[in-house]
Amino acid sequence: MLKIRVWDLPTRLFHWALMVAVMGLLVTGNVGGNWINWHMRLGYAVFTLILFRLVWGFVGGHWSRFGNFVPTPRGLWAYLRGAEPAKHVGHNPLGALSVLALLTVLAAQVGSGLLTDDEIAFTGPLVPLVSSSAVSLASWYHSEVGKLVLLALVALHLSAIAFYRFVKKQRLVQAMLTGDQPAPPPLPAETRDTLSTRFLALAILLGCAGVVFAVVSAGGAG
Ligand code: HEM
Ligand code: HEM
């Protein structure tokens, strides 16, 4: 079987940076104290990464585009009933759903974090813009609900990867590290991963960081 490029470098860097930042957020959020300063910075980094991934889902490499991996309900149903997906590379239909769920829950965690008040020393940057009941709701969601949903999704993510490794004998982690996956002929489309697509990704990332800076400053603290 030949190998083809599936995950471009920007998607791979996005993934491993997201993993490090989310782990840092779970630790700093639970340790609390002055670590909340780092918690907020890491939260802005995740905000930037999510925005980047949304844009990359439209202009990025072939298999990173939402249009090429988000399944139709019919495709998902067929996969759940045991049919092999037509294409053997990229996210499988179930994996695609977990990607979307992870991104959505992370976005909700960032959004609620921006509105969280710990009632001691730290307030999210957008707290001054909303009512106190909205702040209470966001703080409750951030600390009591979102964190648990996220932990459950990450556990599911890792279990699914282990299941594919040991039961279905697919090395998904290797693909997320090297970018390449084995593909049976006829070869499916290959992802473009060149210097110019990487520079494009960097420009998009900087643009996203600018948007995050503007949003965070909107509360008057920036
Ligand atoms: C906090 C921890 C993590 C988060 C939030 C996370 C999130 C994500 C997201 C959002 C994607 C979709 C990538 C994309 O299309 O842009 C993904 C895919 C993937 N992640 Fe993670 N991840 C985490 C930890 C890990 C770890 C520890 C591993 C490996 C041991 C891992 C391995 C993978 C693999 C192999 C894929 C591709 C799955 C596939 O082929 O469908 N992830 N992850
Ligand atoms: C994906 C991003 C984020 C994750 C995974 C996350 C996770 C967490 C966790 C696990 C806690 C501890 C909750 C507890 O048990 O008390 C926490 C607390 C906190 N987070 Fe986040 N957070 C994120 C983003 C943010 C952002 C962007 C901000 C603000 C800019 C923020 C502000 C806070 C504050 C102020 C607390 C302390 C709340 C309290 O002690 O009542 N977080 N976060």
Image (cartoon, grey):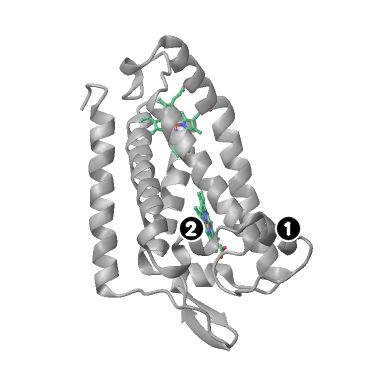
Q: CA distance from mark 1 to mark 2?
A: 18 Å
Height in image: 94 above or below 210? below
Q: Quadrant of residue 158?
A: bottom right
Which residue is located at x 42 percent, y 31 percent?
111
Q: Does the Cβ of the disc 1 residue fall within 8 Å of ligand 1? A: no
Q: Position of residue 191 (x, y in %)?
A: 42, 74
> Toward the viewer: 187 or 9?
187
Height in image: 136 above or below 154? above
Tell whether 61 sits left or right of 89.
left
Residue 179 shows which numbered tag?
A: none
Quadrant of the rendered image holding ligand 2: top left
Residue 66 shows which numbered tag?
A: 2
Which residue is located at x 49 percent, y 60 percent?
67
Q: Secondary structure at mark 1?
A: helix
Q: Position of residue 77 (x, y in %)?
A: 73, 58
Which residue is located at x 27 percent, y 22 percent?
219
Q: Is residue 24 visible?
A: yes
Query: Type of residue at label 1?
Result: Trp
Q: Position of residue 105 (x, y in %)?
A: 53, 39
Q: Position of residue 201 (x, y in %)?
A: 29, 61
Tell whether 23 sits left or right of 56.
right
Q: Is residue 27 visible?
A: no
Mark positioned earlier in the residue sequence (1 or 2): 2
Residue 77 shows which numbered tag?
A: 1
Height in image: 55 above or below 33? below
Q: Does the Cβ of the disc 2 residue fall within 8 Å of ligand 1? A: no
